[in-house]
Image (spheres, rainbow, N blue to C red):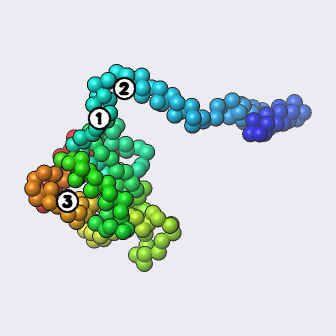
């Protein structure tokens, strides 16, 4: 249907060129350019999601699975990840790529703005289940919360009016988990422009999430026993940098890699 439309447009332009000899050369050149662009659009193959999935798995199986039989043999028997990682759902910040996590290394939880809500068995049961499973059953040794540059969730949080007016079914309610961090940034960084405040909030929201993790009794107990370390991180994909810091009840200086 779309191809028919392109072909009709191309033919129409060609007819116009042949019939209107009085067209000035500039106008005629422009029509030729549009004709070429339309032809190119008509020839561009449509994205095939099924083919993308098929070729993606074929590449994984050939380059990863079949070349690492010991790794995948061990994973078939169980998992013992060292990390529980909270990361944003943003398609640009996959932790497995950014930190080169291999299969079995990290238990992942991804959501809007990589936020961790406080303990609430009814409101945040899905998040609580992931944390409980990772800490109690998998016995992870590190919990890492990663924020990132240009985060849409953080920008959305910064954009919520002071009167609390919302325009979405879920997004604003979710990012308001870190509204205390937003208030802190707006107070302490009021001389910065909006973009700079968002960058500050990307990191401050991580710190609030680390604090919220301590509201989960099994996390708090493991931290007290030095069985788990809580870590914050910030990935800047504009500059190609990664900062990380530890939480030992107080934040230690960040390390830029």
Residue 80 seen in the figure:
yes
On the image, which quarter does residue 222 sit in?
bottom left
Q: Is residue 28 left or right of residue 46?
A: right
On the image, which quarter does residue 38 sit in?
top right
Q: Is residue 126 left or right of residue 171?
A: left
Please tell me which residue is depicted at 39% across the width and 54% down the height of the picture: 111
Residue 23 seen in the figure:
no
Across and down, in percent, residue 134 comes to 26, 50
* Disc nearer the start of the sequence (3/1): 1
Observer-nearest of 98 and 256: 98
Alpha-carbon span between mark 2 and mark 3: 35 Å
Instruction: Look at mark 2 in the image and give the residue it sits on.
Output: 64
Q: Is residue 209 left or right of residue 63?
A: left
Q: Is residue 242 left or right of residue 26?
A: left
On the image, which quarter does residue 240 sit in?
top left
Please tell me which residue is depicted at 31% across the width and 68% down the height of the picture: 120
Across and down, in percent, residue 110 comes to 37, 51
Alpha-carbon span between mark 1 and mark 2: 18 Å
* Disc nearer the start of the sequence (2/3): 2
Instruction: Look at mark 3 in the image and give the residue it sits on.
Output: 218
Q: Residue 221, relative to residue 110: is it above or below?
A: below
Across and down, in percent, residue 88 comes to 37, 51
Q: Residue furthest left?
A: 225
Quick one: quadrant of the C terminus? top left
Residue 77 is marked as: 1
Please tell me which residue is depicted at 10% across the width and 59% down the height of the picture: 224
Tag nearer the camera, 2 or 3: 3
């Amino acid at each position: 249907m779309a191809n028919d439309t392109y072909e009709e447009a191309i033919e129409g332009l060609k007819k116009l060129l042949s019939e209107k000899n009085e067209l000035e050369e500039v106008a005629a050149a422009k029509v030729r350019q549009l004709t070429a662009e339309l032809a190119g659009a008509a020839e561009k193959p449509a994205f095939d999601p099924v083919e993308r999935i098929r070729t993606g798995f074929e590449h994984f199986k050939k380059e990863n699975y079949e070349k690492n039989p010991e790794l995948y043999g061990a994973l078939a028997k169980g998992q013992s990840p060292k990390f529980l990682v909270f990361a944003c759902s943003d398609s640009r910040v996959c932790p497995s790529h950014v930190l080169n996590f291999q299969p079995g290394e990290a238990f992942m939880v991804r959501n809007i703005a990589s936020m961790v809500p406080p303990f609430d068995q009814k409101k945040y049961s899905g998040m609580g289940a992931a944390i409980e499973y990772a800490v109690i059953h998998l016995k992870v040794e590190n919990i890492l919360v990663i924020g990132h540059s240009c985060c849409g969730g953080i920008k959305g949080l910064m954009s919520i009016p002071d009167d609390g007016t919302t325009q979405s079914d879920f997004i604003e309610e979710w990012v308001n988990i870190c509204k205390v961090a937003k208030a802190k940034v707006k107070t302490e960084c009021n001389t910065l422009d909006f973009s700079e405040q968002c960058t500050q909030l990307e990191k401050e929201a991580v710190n609030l999430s680390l604090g919220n993790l301590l509201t989960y009794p099994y996390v708090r107990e493991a931290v007290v026993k030095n069985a788990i370390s809580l870590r914050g991180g910030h990935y800047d994909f504009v500059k190609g940098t990664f900062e990380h810091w530890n939480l030992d009840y107080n934040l230690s200086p960040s390390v830029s890699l």
